[in-house]
Image (cartoon, grey):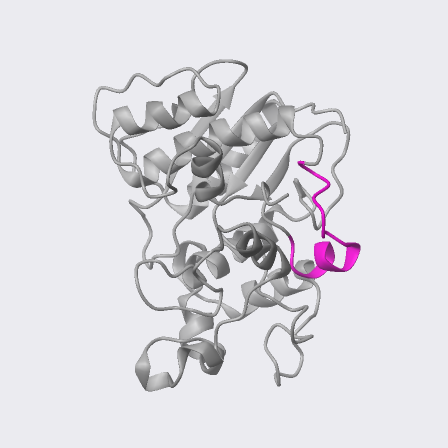
């Protein structure tokens, strides 16, 4: 497809409880300019991110990336939450299901994991053997085969590296974007307009020639940006790892979308997988 996006936005997301989240950071890469942080000193709420995205989406065709899983695994076992009645088996319907079951503030989803479907999520050794809980999607398996697997599962809700809370909070966000902005690959991309994709920073760090570990300095960020063919950033402060993730990923999304013919047509992505599990942008 011909790329029509005018800007590329990476959003480092958070599933934390509360109204404001220091773990959220947003960066924009536009044209050939260096990526820039959006309101770098601001502590975002998830609702604010939603409003900001919708306004920018209407302003110009933008590719937005979020670092959470757009759906849990389903291909492997045939169900998102095996043994539960009334749970949909497609991503669009599952987003609505998650949203309807949550009463957390600011699009949070902790109640879904901790109360509504507690038995499906691993919170610690008291739950039993962790391997009995964790499952991965087909795109995760492909990334693993390339030597860069995501180490976290949407069912793993313990530790700093867990993605469960962020992912299910993200599904509530996707519910509100549904029908307003194309959500790839659940939705086909149009020849115009904005779209939302799932991202994973480590893909772009490795593409830049880095080890894949978190970056925590201006010098390290600019080294990664150089590897991605981007101009360096000029910051008056040392960025957080959330900010570095957003800056590098925005540049990486731009490079991938404009130079990789298979960016939106990766090997292994079938209509069934697109409808039910989704795919991480950059897993080719």
Above or below, 158 against 116 in this view is above
Residue 79 at x, y percent in the picture: 66, 75
Which quarter of the picture shows residue 248?
top left
Is residue 61 visible in the rendered image? The answer is: no
In-image side of 206 versus 92 (left or right): left
The dominant secondary structure in magenta is loop
Foreground pick, 21 / 199: 199
Identified at 77% across, 54% down, the residue is: 270
Which quarter of the picture shows residue 205?
top left
Above or below, 123 against 39 in this view is below
Give the quarter of the figure containing the N terminus: top right
Which quarter of the picture shows residue 262?
top right
Residue 247 at x, y percent in the picture: 40, 30
In-image side of 72 versus 48 (left or right): right
In-image side of 275 versus 208 (left or right): right
Residue 158 at x, y percent in the picture: 34, 68
Identified at 55% across, 63% down, the residue is: 99
Above or below, 19 against 208 in this view is below
Residue 42 at x, y percent in the picture: 30, 34
Is residue 18 visible in the rendered image? The answer is: yes
Q: Is residue 176 magenta?
A: no
Foreground pick, 208 / 200: 208
Count up the numbered dots. 0
Identified at 33% across, 35% down, the residue is: 243
Outermost residue on the left side: it is 237
Q: Which residues are magenta?
A: 263-278
Identified at 67% across, 44% down, the residue is: 184
């Amino acid at each position: 497809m011909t790329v029509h996006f005018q800007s590329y936005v990476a959003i480092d997301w958070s599933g934390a409880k509360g109204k404001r989240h220091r773990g959220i950071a947003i960066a924009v890469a536009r044209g050939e300019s260096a990526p820039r942080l959006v309101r770098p000193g601001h502590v975002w709420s998830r609702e604010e991110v939603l409003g900001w995205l919708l306004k920018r989406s209407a302003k110009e065709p933008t590719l937005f990336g979020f670092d959470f899983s757009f759906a849990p695994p389903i291909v492997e076992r045939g169900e998102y939450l095996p043994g539960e009645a009334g749970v949909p088996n497609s991503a669009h319907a599952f987003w609505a299901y998650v949203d309807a079951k949550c009463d957390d503030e600011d699009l949070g989803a902790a109640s879904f994991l901790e109360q509504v479907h507690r038995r499906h999520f691993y919170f610690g050794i008291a739950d039993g053997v962790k391997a009995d809980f964790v499952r991965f999607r087909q795109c995760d398996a492909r990334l693993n085969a390339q030597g860069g697997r995501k180490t976290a599962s949407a069912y793993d809700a313990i530790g700093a590296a867990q993605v469960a809370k962020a992912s299910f909070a993200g599904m509530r966000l996707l519910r509100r974007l549904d029908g307003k902005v194309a959500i790839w690959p659940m939705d086909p991309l149009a020849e115009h307009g904005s779209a939302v994709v799932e991202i994973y920073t480590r893909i772009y760090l490795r593409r830049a020639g880095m080890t894949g570990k978190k970056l925590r300095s201006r010098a390290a960020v600019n080294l990664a940006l150089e590897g991605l063919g981007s101009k360096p950033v000029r910051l008056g402060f040392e960025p957080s790892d959330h900010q570095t993730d957003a800056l590098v990923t925005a540049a990486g999304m731009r490079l991938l979308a404009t130079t990789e013919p298979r960016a939106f047509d990766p090997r292994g992505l079938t209509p069934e997988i697109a409808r039910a599990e989704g795919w991480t942008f950059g897993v080719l």
